[in-house]
Image (spheres, rainbow, N blue to C red):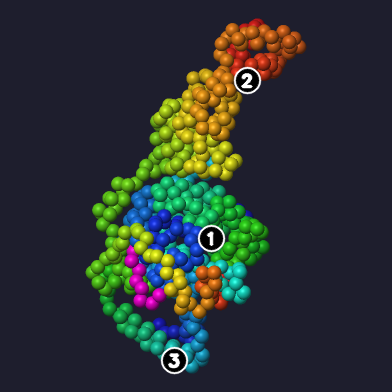
Amino acid sequence: MKWEVVIGLEVHTQLSTCSKIFSGSSTAFGAAPNTQASAVDIALPGVLPVMNRAAVEKAICFGLAVDAHINRTSVFARKNYFYPDLPKGYQISQFELPIVEGGHINIVVGDTVKTVQLTRAHLEEDAGKSLHEDFQGMTGIDLNRAGTPLLEIVSEPDMRSAAEAVAYARALYTLVTWLGMCDGNMQEGSFRVDANVSVRPLGQAELGTRREIKNLNSFRFLEQAINYEIQWQIDLLEDGGRVQQATVLFDPDSGETRVMRTKEDAHDYRYFPDPDLLPLVITEADIDAVRATLPELPAAMAVRFAETYGVSAYDAGLLTQSLALAQYFEAAVALCPQGKLLANWVNGELAARLNREDRALAACSLSAARLAGLVARIADGTLSSKLAKQVFDALWDSDLDADAIIERDGLKQVSDSGAIEKLVDEAIAANPKAVEEFRAGKEKALNALAGQVMKASKGKANPAQVQDILRQRLQ
Amino acid sequence: MSLSTTDVSRIAGLARLRMNEAEIIAAQGQLNGIFGLIEAMQAVDTQGVLPMAHPQEASLRLRPDAVTETDRRAAYQAVAPAVEKGLYLVPKVIE
């Protein structure tokens, strides 16, 4: 039987505010346990929550960026469950009236663009952390994270493969970091993904029973977990079994998912409007103020890069993976208007280097201006692409600019035809066999000769010129 | 609608309450009394009336995003039953 996979994602993005959503405690990561947990965060009796304006603004910002509806009135609700790292016994969240409804995000999978619809995005507070190791039969509770503002972004079940789910998660990640509403630090839990996965016979309208994979904090785990889960469900169904609705956890070590709880013992959260918080009212003026601060969005910027700088759609997509990278490219292209060539270097050599050294662009000493200086010398024929790689390496390891390195290391490409002719003649004289082969119709022999010339010039001869002169001489 | 004793046990479970037979029967009576009240309210025609999240005609006050709290861990942990390495200790719970 042919199966169709159906996936929807719920993503918790931590909003990058200085203080918590309902208290004036710091949200800085890594402080000593419970030193950033105020009376409100630890839920002492009689305390009341006061809403952080920045969290509201960031939620509005997201809603505008995905073309969603911003509810002019939204309501906070209590989501009740008992767990020691949730000191109130409820999480303040939004249920019936979230701040953002609808919206959509475009994703690219292979060559096709697909639109994923969003259901909603709501504001809520994070819980604390439980540490189960270290304490004999006891659990240690750190409430520093309790009350950190989150925007939970819920998609429609629009994705049909793990690859699409990853593409969506990546696009969402690019967007929330681009907007500056989330720092995107996945190790610290700033971007956590829950995946709802089900399968159904292809062509069936009704959805299969889903299982929810909780708390995936890397794109690689997201892909692995979904692929494992899909196969597990298909195997079960093909063996005549039935999927039972459940919440599962992914174990990266075994690569498997395992059941955390089934629907039988699933929480019944008994939501109700929180009497401690009045309805959140958003005015047109609030929305306009946020709209005025909205940066150019990645999709729009990619289109502009393609139109203005002649960059391919694929390269433009890569260049707009992060705001820092896009700004780097723009700074470079302003100095050296060779969009296509620059894009090749940014997406090629620079990206590979950063990747290999596991470095962020911000931590890289090769400025946009210095890269532009290199690309300008390729464009004007001073450097062959081979010499350019050499200069790139030197740029990476020093703070000199390209011209200074070319001068210092004598890397200027030789385009003086007199000098090249001399080398060509020498090569012809020294390799009579290759000459004979070429004259007998073997094209490859020309490359061997050209190689000899390049070697004799220490890689500095202009390769196109070498080929031309060789042909002239041998005809 | 009226609740069975099984429903009451389940709700008690969710609220982490341990109740004996007699308490369950007593709570069943009380809860059903509340449901009776709800049924009476549901008989009212609410067509066209917006659900009310809050009784007052007021909206949420927003505060500026600034850190105003200082570290008062020592004071808060002075009343905690068990503390170690700055953490509150509770009986082990693993989900």
Residue toward you, A302 or A421: A421
Label 2: how many Cα within 10 Å (few below 14, some 14–19, many 20+):
some
Q: Secondary structure at mark 1?
A: strand
Q: Which mark is residue A459?
A: 2
Which residue carries the number 3 mark?
B26
User: What is the quadrant of the N terminus of chain B in the image?
Assistant: bottom left
**Magenta segment:** A44-51
Closest to the camera, between mark 1 and mark 3, is 1
Which residue carries the number 1 mark?
A215
The chain identifier of the residue carrying mark 1 reads A
Residue A304 screen position, x and y as percent: 39, 35
Q: Is residue A349 left or right of residue A104?
A: right
Residue toward you, A55 or B3: A55
Name the residue rendered at 28%, 58% in the picture: A282
- The mark that comes first in sequence, 1 or 2, is 1
Q: Is residue A360 above or below residue A315?
A: below
Residue A198 screen position, x and y as percent: 55, 59
